[in-house]
Image (cartoon, rainbow, N blue to C red):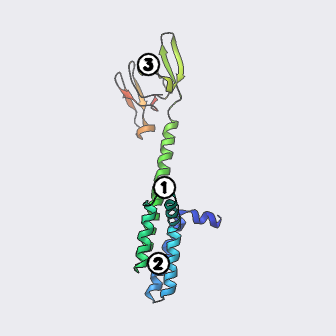
Amino acid sequence: MSLKKLFKNEIFKIILGTILLICAVILGQFDIFEISLAFYILALSVCGGKVFVSAVKGIIRGDVFDENLLMCIASIGAMLIGEYTEGVAIMLFFLVGETFEHRAIKHSRASIRSLMDICPDEACILTDSGECTVDAEDVEPGALIIVRPGERVPLDCVVEEGSADVDTSCMTGESLPISATVGTTLNSGYIVL
């Protein structure tokens, strides 16, 4: 892994920033102020470098009071009054929060994408002239949809005729099938067994 990619990795920045902060605190205990301060500043730049750049870009765009600028003010303010550990901790905790947020968003997008893939693109509907296959998006409300065993339900619907066991595990996570009879509401993506 190249050095540039390594410094873009948020987990690496969290670990490095934590190590530098611990070193700074330990050096501060031995009254080596100049070296300790250098480690604090280095830890702050590792944890908050991206935040500082985003704050400057926000000021240029006219976004004066965004979260990045407020974090910078809090961190620099703590450093100026001599609370070096708190100044670095602000950026470190903000970085940890941002990392969790990005991972949660990434996971949510992947989950939504997988849910979109389970719905069929076509539906078999019953018309006056017989069965007809159309795009699921083109099915009018009130149309009769035919779903055969082994097929996925293309749209949210209510059972009008017949009965079957339905696998809902793709949506609910439960492996037990439900029994669908007349009047049962089915969600798109369910599989008729």
Whole-percent x and y of residue 185? 37, 28
Dot 3 amino acid type? Ala
Task: Name the spot of residue 178 as percent of width and height, x first.
Answer: 38, 31
Q: Residues within 10 Å of mark 2 (few under 14, many from 20)?
A: some
* Residue furthest out toward the left: 183
Q: Front-most of 22 and 72?
A: 72
Residue drawn where x is 48% and y is 81% of the image: 24
Disc 2 marks a residue whose amino acid type is: Ile
Please name the residue shown 53% across and 21% down the image: 134
Query: Which residue is found at the position 46% from the left and 60% from the top?
Result: 98
Q: Is 100 drawn above or below residue 159 in the view shown?
A: below
| Total numbered circles | 3
Amino acid marked by disc 1:
His
Is residue 38 shown to the viewer in this render?
A: yes
Work out how far the residue at label 2 is from the one at label 3, CA to CA, in angstroms. Answer: 67 Å
How packed mark 3 is, by other alpha carbons closer than 10 Å (few <14, some 14-19, many 20 or more), is few
Location of residue 117 with respect to 145 vertically, above or below: below
Q: Nearer the viewer, residue 107 or 147?
A: 107
Q: Earlier in the sequence, mark 2 or mark 1?
A: 2
Question: Please, which residue is most extreme toward the top here?
Answer: 129
Query: Who comes first in sequence, dot 1 or dot 3?
Result: 1
Give the residue number, with chain letter if any, for mark 1: 102
In this figure, which residue is indicated by the disc labeled 2? 22
- Circle 1 residues within 10 Å: few <14, some 14–19, many ≥20: few
Label 2 to label 1, Cα distance in Å? 26 Å
Q: Is residue 135 left or right of residue 161?
A: right
| Whether residue 139 is situated above or below residue 95 in the rendered picture | above
Q: Which mark is residue 143?
A: 3
Choose top left, top right, bottom left or bottom right for residue 163: top left
* Quarter of the image that includes the N terminus: bottom right
Q: Residue at x 51, y 9 (%)?
A: 129
Q: CB atoms at circles 2 and 3 under 8 Å apart?
A: no
